[in-house]
Image (cartoon, rainbow, N blue to C red):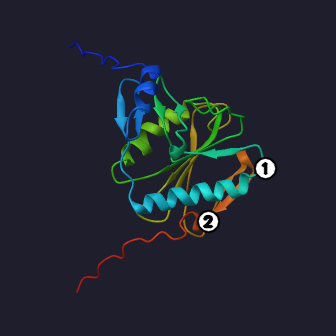
Amino acid sequence: MDTALRQPVMTRAQFFQWAQAQDAPYEFDGLQPVAMTGENLRHNVLHFNIHTALRQRLKGTGCRPLGADADAGVATIGDSVRYPDALVTCTPITGDEYLTPNVVVVFEVISPTSGRTDRIVKVREYAAVPSILRYVIVESASIGLTVLERQTGDQKWTVTTLMADDTLPLPEIGIQIPIAELYEGVDFPTPETSS
């Protein structure tokens, strides 16, 4: 049975040029642009808290937090380009690049529509980037993190789950963050009680 292979709609370079003219954010799956999902207020608060925690702790260390709002792209498998909610690089950047060099840590805040991509597709893509040592998946429907840590010398991850009373260790960049701090000011709907 013959299966037609999907042909790229554009190259990575064409995507960067095209994306600059768009009003909405897109990622590039290596073949075509993919619209990024809209964020709700809870997602925005989590995004802000992650950046604040990273910025406060990394000031003066030579490492820098960036994220989707800064158009900090990560080259993954093939020509794919992802824009995580937050990332950390400890490599100097000029500001002229479209791709962030030597990303060490990546954060993705899960939304109802991005769960499959963030938990399956991006796990494989980020594992293919040797510099990424830790991938942190932040839940937005409840308090909890899934932390994937690279095993030395390969693309396999060790997976840990963290809850409200835990602390997120980030030894790659010499810091740790209490989970409660990441969720500060985040309100979750209370479950309806049945009578």
Q: Mark 1: few, some, or many residues within 10 Å (few <14, many ≥20)? A: few
Residue at the farthest right position: 60
User: How many numbered discs, if any?
Assistant: 2
Residue marked by disc 2 = 166
Q: Which quadrant is the C terminus positioned in?
A: bottom left
Determine the image quadrant of residue 93.
Answer: top right
Q: Mark 2: few, some, or many residues within 10 Å (few <14, many ≥20)? A: some
What residue sits 76% from the left and 43% below the top? 62
Point out the tag, 1 or 2, that comes first from the N-terminus: 1
What residue sits 42% from the left and 19% below the top? 11
- The vertical placement of 77 against 189, above or below, is above
Q: Residue 124 carries which label?
A: none
Residue marked by disc 1 = 60
Determine the image quadrant of residue 87.
Answer: top right
**194 or 68, which is in the foreground?**
68
Residue at the farthest bottom position: 195
Q: What element carries label 1?
A: loop
**75 or 123, which is in the foreground?**
75
The image position of residue 123, as x and y in percent, is 48, 39
Residue 134 visible (yes or no): no
**56 or 131, which is in the foreground?**
56
Give the residue type that dot 2 points to: Asp
Give the residue type that dot 1 points to: Gly
